[in-house]
Amino acid sequence: MADASFKDVPELFEVELTESLTARTESLSTFRELGPPDLVHVLKSTGRSGQRDLGSYHYVSGVDASSSASLAAYINSLTYNIEDDSGWFSKGTSWKVKSGCYCCFNAFSRVDVRVDVKIPGGVQAYVVDLRGERHEATPEIWQETFLSALLRAILYSDDPTYWLEAYRKLDPITTLEGELRFLQAAEALFMKGWQVGSDPEIQVATVVSNHLTAAIMKYFGDSGRYQHAANLFEKILQKEPEVASLLAKSYLGMNEEVKAVQIMASAIKQTPQSYTLLHVQCDFLRAKGKYDWALKLARQAVNCAPSEFVTWEKLTEIYIDMGQYENALLTLNSCPMFTYNGRDAHRNLNPARVHLPPKGAIVDILPERIKTEDDEADPALLRLPAPGLRGTWARAYSLLTRLVSQIGWDELLKTRSSVFVMEEEYRMQKAQSERPQSATGGKVIHEDGTVSSPQRGDSLQGAAAARADDDASTRGVASPTQSAPDEDGQGAENVTDPETLANANGLPTIRISTESAREQAAKDNAANGHEETKENGVQEAPGQTLEKPVQAAENNQDGEGGQSASQEPFSFSNKRLCERWLDNLFMVLYEDLRVWTIFRAEVAHFKTQHVAYRKTGLEWEILGDLGMRLHHKEEAKEAYQRCLDTPRYSYKPWSKLLDMYAEEGDIQRTLQVAVRVAAYQWGEYTEMTYPTQIARCFFKLGQIHGHAKISYTLLSMGLPEPVLKIMESYLQYGRIFKVEGYDF
């Protein structure tokens, strides 16, 4: 069946005819936001009686979806792409495209627009709603579909977390006329932008915080052409004052700071409750070093939108900038966390056959795509939970890693124990409240950290009330079901005795709760394999690696003097309960730091012994990611470079190094790495120029050195003609759209 395949278009052959269309129709109601990429289904036939037709499909983005004619033209182009396997003397079985169906999801009206093409024959366009019923396609539906397809092409273009087999990415906008149509459609549908959803860190999509505005800022921001975005926002500002935040951000991107300040000053009088506008002001003041002014605005933004994660995140960042680490930790603890919802995707089907033809000469420079020993790694590295974090959890973890990179692990533990109620404090307070001699009766420790006495001074009722609070609290406070000391005091002794902790074969884990609470937390934890990694950490970590995380227990034993009964030993009124998710992130951070410390110690040891330090390609890649997470950029770069020495098929290290070299302004290395990144992208059928990571890095270099220098450097590299043509296409985009640096 090789002759039934396309020459250079990936495709998945169906087991049953049209099963991909049926699966898409059944999945329509599950698409929450932008929807999945477009689905193209074709039927191939030999025209002979008794010969079974073949059905195949692939995914595509970047096709002009403004009318049925443009979608039919794409299917018609596939008819010229089929392989001709006829011999010299005998005509082989000739397969032809019999019919095709192009499916494009309309994210505004939540319907699927489909175009059926019969070859030869007519074209039929219709709309399928969430119930599977057919309707007529109106001009309004086509405009929404056109913009929906553009948004997917722009936002899915270089998203490393979104991968589909047989997914072909084409250039969404190739001419100035196409860009003008994009701007016109965006202006017409701007007020409906909230309907297409927003990034996972935004809880409620608004007119200014949604996928439409994100795509506009990404498309024009990556090439530094903010003036087109500013022109669009100027028009919309008359109808919607909140757009002033986007307009100010565009002017700041154009280095028009005076205009931006004037817009922000007038807009804050009209919309004082706009947290997006307050955030633009915050970022501007932070860039100028006015952190105390930015702090006031960030607090106001939290008051305006207390249920949004990004407002608390911004406040935490400013506290870290100012060195107020206790406030930063308390603010991070207050962040509202949301369930992560990934991109919309099709239901996976098991294809009868997968056809992935090689795409051009550029892919010849890539290593073989076979599994080797370099694709294996130490289980301790594979089980690290941090790479599994997504959405708000990943953003909160990056704040925590920024904290530890500035103040160190020991100081972070001290800060944590000074602002959060620790397990030992709770146990000792609870033990005092259960004493019958206590004049105050049983105390109840509430969610906000305050201590109160119930009306009836029964210690059991006090314990029950405390237990009810614990169920709603976090691992910062132990579950009293198992953490209360036994009658002989053995339970408390096992935890509070520092000698016992020190003799536990190295480091104890960050243990702020009992085993039962930890098991319950593991169910809620986003990272799989969390508990096993933690246990291995106790066995493997050397005693000198990290300081014991249980510090509050040692400090609190000093308060067990004779006057502790009359004086409250712990100021619970000044402390908070640590949220369970934040406590889990501390554990994740501990695992990262433990592995990183062991790795750096091994590197130093091997250097002193003058012995080569060897790791597999996958291990170097994981260690590079770990270094980036912990803000050790130079060590991470070294790990990625070591990964390139292994014959492993992997796109990530090249991609990471491309960003690093472009940031450093290193033209030669950036271009060398960019050729490899382009090869990997073309190997995955990403046949697009912009917006891509390579184009973004080229334009960043072009602002400093000019596009002519980049072009001459490419010529000096002696690349094969097909490869040079692909690399020049990124600069060709810059010439057409007049990106900064194109003329020098």
Image (spheres, helix red, strand yellow):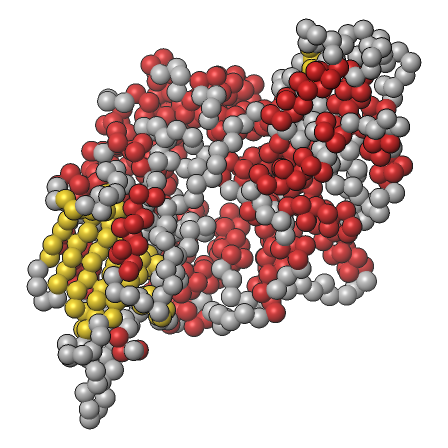
Instruction: Name the foreground residue: 314 vs 419.
Output: 419
Q: In the picture, residue 426 is in which quadrant?
A: top right
**Residue drawn at (60%, 25%) of the image:** 472
Residue 136: horizontal and vertical position, in percent? 12, 44
The answer to whether 72 is drawn above or below residue 422 in the figure is below
**Residue drawn at (68%, 20%) of the image:** 464
**Residue drawn at (19%, 51%) of the image:** 114
Instruction: Name the foreground residue: 532 vs 371.
Output: 532
- Picture quarter with the N terminus: bottom left
Q: Can residue 17 be seen here?
A: yes
Q: Can residue 449 be seen here?
A: no
Residue 570: horizontal and vertical position, in percent? 77, 17
Q: Is residue 538 left or right of residue 326?
A: right
Q: Is residue 460 left or right of residue 719?
A: right
Instruction: Name the foreground residue: 602 vs 513.
Output: 513
Residue 139: horizontal and vertical position, in percent? 12, 41
The answer to whether 614 is drawn above or below residue 655 in the figure is below
Numbered-mark total: 0
Q: In the picture, residue 235 is in which quadrant?
A: top left
**Residue drawn at (43%, 44%) of the image:** 342
- Which residue sits furthest left? 121
Q: Is residue 58 left or right of residue 684?
A: left
- Which residue sits furthest right? 562
Residue 146: horizontal and vertical position, in percent? 22, 45
